[in-house]
Image: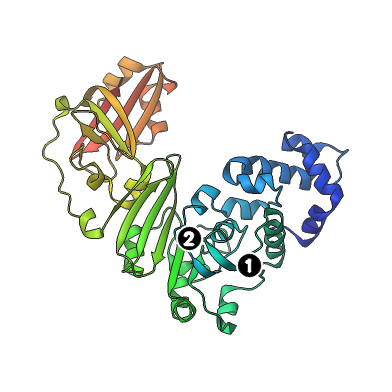
Amino acid sequence: MMTPEQYRLLLTPEVRHTVEEQIGRDPAAIALDKRIPHAALVATQVKYLARARTKLPSYYEARCILPPLAFEQASSEACAARKSCSGERVLDLTCGLGVDALYLSKRFREVITLERDATLAAVAGENFRRLGATNIRVINSSAEAFLASTRDHFDWIYADPDRRSAEGRKLVRLEDCSPDIPKLLPELRRIAPNLCVKNSPLFDVGEALRLFPDSRVEVLSLGDECKEVVIYADGTGPGITATALGRGSFTATPAQAGATPPPGAFEPDRYRWLVVPDVALQKARLARLHLRGKADIWSENGYGFATERPEGIIGKVFAIERIEPYDPRRLKRAFKGRGAELMKRDFPFAAEELGRRLGVHAGNDVRLAFTKIGSGFWVVRLE
């Protein structure tokens, strides 16, 4: 965590000017440059500003202060902008770097955001000033302490609980995170009718609906990576949405999601197209429903197969050259020493292990997809 002294230094004109001068340089070289006062601190800010150009472009443009841990744990601006709640007033229980609070401020007249670490609360307040977000008020308090004393009312409460234990271990169960949202639920309902909770990408969609039966649950992905599972406990559910940012969304009820029967026997010679459902569909368990009538798919974690090129797919589509049973010896004879792009879904070996078994290295001479259908293991050669 950033120390109070480091924060004070980053407010000084001297250090701010130095950071600006060093943008674009290798942070490792900056840290070793004895001519630069507070070189390690400057190097860290340059490093995270460079990363912010993609993840947090507004923070980069405003030259915000970026504590490393808070940066790593922050939502990307693309994900924060997706939050679909709005109204007059919102209470954010877990400010952190404040990216979600910043985007909530575009949807609410007033944002109250809580941060239990005094230095990080000061950093967030300074960053909001630089970003021109004048309708956000940062309060240095834990969620528990604030809820015990407030008599305010809000339209929404937003929470992104801390998913690290005191020892640094990753936490997934909502009850294990801080603050403990299920435990605080009576207090939350006392001051707001609606609740939005951001969870880890590992969080189970079924668990979300168990805890909040009438909620909308949205799985967000960006660039083929699942980023977060968001619960909207506002009584408008139950519903599940898979959203691949920049690609599209697909929504269904839990009953619809579980009503798609698997296809019959796998007939590899029929298929000409391989469909790779986006990871948001996979995580939301909506891949089979999304591909219904467009491609055959035997598992939510597997590939789809189509006789004609499907349209309107949230995912990727590849032309198939050949589908054959997985035979590592035959594949090794065919491809040993060549460059290969290896893909896999619902297959017991990691891509690195497959590469070792087949004697191939990373490259683009050939593209192979591995999967399991029923009790059979298959390899798909792609054009």
At x 72%, y 59%, the residue is 126
Where is residue 98 shown, x and y percent of the image? 61, 59
Circles 1 and 2: CB atoms closer than 8 Å: no
76 vs 352, left or right, is right
Q: Quadrant of the C terminus?
A: top left
What's the distance in space between the residues labelled 1 and 2, CA to CA? 20 Å
Front residue (pair 303, 233): 233
Q: Which mark is residue 115?
A: 1
Q: Amino acid at mark 1?
A: Glu
Where is residue 223 shown, x and y percent of the image? 45, 39
Front residue (pair 128, 180): 128
Q: Quadrant of the N terminus?
A: bottom right
Q: How is the image coloured?
A: rainbow
Circle 1 Cα neighbour tier, 10 Å, few/some/many (<14 / 14–19 / ≥20): many
Q: Is residue 268 above or below residue 217?
A: above
Question: Which numbered disc, 1 or 2, marks the residue closer to the eye?
Answer: 1
At x 13%, y 30%, the residue is 267
171 vs 17, left or right, is left
Badge 1 element: loop
Front residue (pair 170, 70): 70
Q: Is residue 75 above or below residue 149?
A: above
Q: Quadrant of residue 367?
A: top left
Determine which residue is flagged by label 2.
171
Q: Is residue 89 above or below residue 64?
A: below
Q: Amino acid at mark 2?
A: Leu
Where is residue 189 shown, x and y percent of the image? 44, 78
* Identity of the residue furthest to the right in this view: 35
